[in-house]
Image: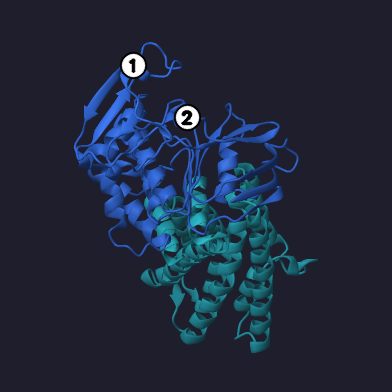
Amino acid sequence: MMALVAMRVAGFVRGGRALAPLIAVLVELGVIYGGGPSPAAVAYGYSAAALFPVLAWLTKLLLDTEPDVQRRLARLSVGPAREAVAGVLAATLLSLVVCVAAMAAPWLFHGIDTSTDLGTGIALGVLAHLLAVPPAVAVGALASRAVTGSVRMGLTVLVVAAVLVVVLGLSGSFAPWLVPPVMATARELNDPGVPPAGTLALLTAWAAAWCAVAFLGYGWLRRGRS
Amino acid sequence: MRFDGVWFRYARRADWTLREVDATAAPGATVVVLGRNGAGKSTLLQLAAGVLRPGRGVISDRPPTIGWVPERFPAGQPFTAGEYLRRMARIRGVTDPHAVDRWTERLLLTEHTGTRLADLSKGTAQKVGLAQALLLPPGLLVLDEPWEGLDAVARTLIPEIVAEVTAAGGTVLVSDHRGEITALPGAIHWTVSEHGVHASPPPAPDLPTSEPSVSELPESDPPDEVIVEVAVRRSEATQAVAELRAAGHRVLRIEDADVRRTPSPTETTPDREARPTQRESR
């Protein structure tokens, strides 16, 4: 299965489709850090939330790069479950690389305020990104051509999900649990002081539960579609 | 492998592409799938390979190792032919380190291993598709229009490969709309239509099994045929037979047991003669 993950990552990176989301990441980093240094936790909280739609888009692009017939050949070679997992793993790996780059980039142009508690800020930032990556990959997978079958439907799923994550994630939302806690995490990190451990555990459990449902849905939808 | 009451459609509200398919392909059998354009040949083959799932009914007793040669090789990938095959070998868990080289050489792909898939000609890309399906010895080989785009030499390889897979107990399903099936003697025919799949046994031999001479040619033979006796080197005999068949000639007799790798009901193989001799009529 790892050979399939490697093939998909290589196919995506070499195919040149990675360029567009990469530019989007650079623009976002420019917007977030352009206004001068901010505390690590605050900056990384916003960075994770801003990366969410880009990582979902990246996942869809990666999964859609492989021609349908090649995906079917892969499915025959490793079985349907492993084929689906290999795509999710490839997208997760690339998303983590993007997150590491996005967290390292502000250090190059002094975007992080070093006068605050750096260790805690960075740890919270890592958590925020880790809570954003799996739901983003799940949204991208649900928007992929193998599930939606058409470009229009795929883009609709991607855009609607990205908008809902923001709209339903606003404070005072009537159904915040319908979307992953990307905005909620950013808000917690924006507040001064370290969020209590109970809050962080709740956010983690919320993200895990949301991802479990989303990935189960992906598996179920992929069952009949090769 | 068995199809039991298999129905298939591409979307929930679409018309059924295949209806009530009941068919069986035994190990060692070659099945040629026939039918007009759009009849569902490719769909049937993809169901057999397990690429598509039936809407109704079941397909059972499918061998574990399946080689599928799609109708169009997915050439839109940023890999060279050699790298693609090496990656597919790793994905398929091929343990034989020489498998890729062996099939690359045999399918005459050696000079193309460094060429990007997108730059390959249609026929060469088709050969890459064939190679990936054969990296593991398949228990079921599904060939969707394998002759498409292949040159004369490469076309002769297909009957050879089919014969090898069936000799090892594998089942081969092959679709054909160009009339190349003459190269696959002894194949069962499945004709796909809107009424399902009609299976028919191999066509009855149209020649006596004893050694025919020019004067004893059956009356059913077309009048414009002549018998040409050809002697070929033992090492090249199998290929020569396949090439002659691919060119539309009928091979009537092969006089050497060693070269009889693509058996046909029209062949006899007396062992007494040391020199391989073929009779060909056209």
- Judging depth in this view, the residue of A192 and B7 nearest the camera is B7
Q: Which chain is blue?
A: B
Image location (x, y in percent) of residue B246: 36, 29
Please identify the residue farthest to the top as the structure is shown: B223
What residue sits 21% from the left and 33% below the top? B232
The chain letter under disc 1 is B
Q: Secondary structure at mark 1?
A: helix
Image location (x, y in percent) of residue B268: 36, 36
Query: Disc number at residue B215?
Result: 1
The residue where tag 2 is placed is: B205
Q: Is residue A198 above or below residue A80?
A: below
Image location (x, y in percent) of residue A197: 64, 88
- Judging depth in this view, the residue of B29 and B17 nearest the camera is B29
Query: Disc number at residue A213?
Result: none
Badge 1: residue crowd in 10 Å (few <14, some 14–19, many ≥20): few
Q: Is residue A218 above or below residue B246?
A: below
Q: Which chain is cyan?
A: A
The chain letter under disc 2 is B
* Three-letter code for the amino acid on which mark 1 is drawn: Ser
* Three-letter code for the amino acid on which mark 2 is drawn: Pro
Name the image quarter holding residue B154: top left
- In the rendered structure, the answer to whether residue A139 lies left or right of residue A171 reads left
Task: For marks 1 and 2, give the one nearer the viewer.
Answer: 1
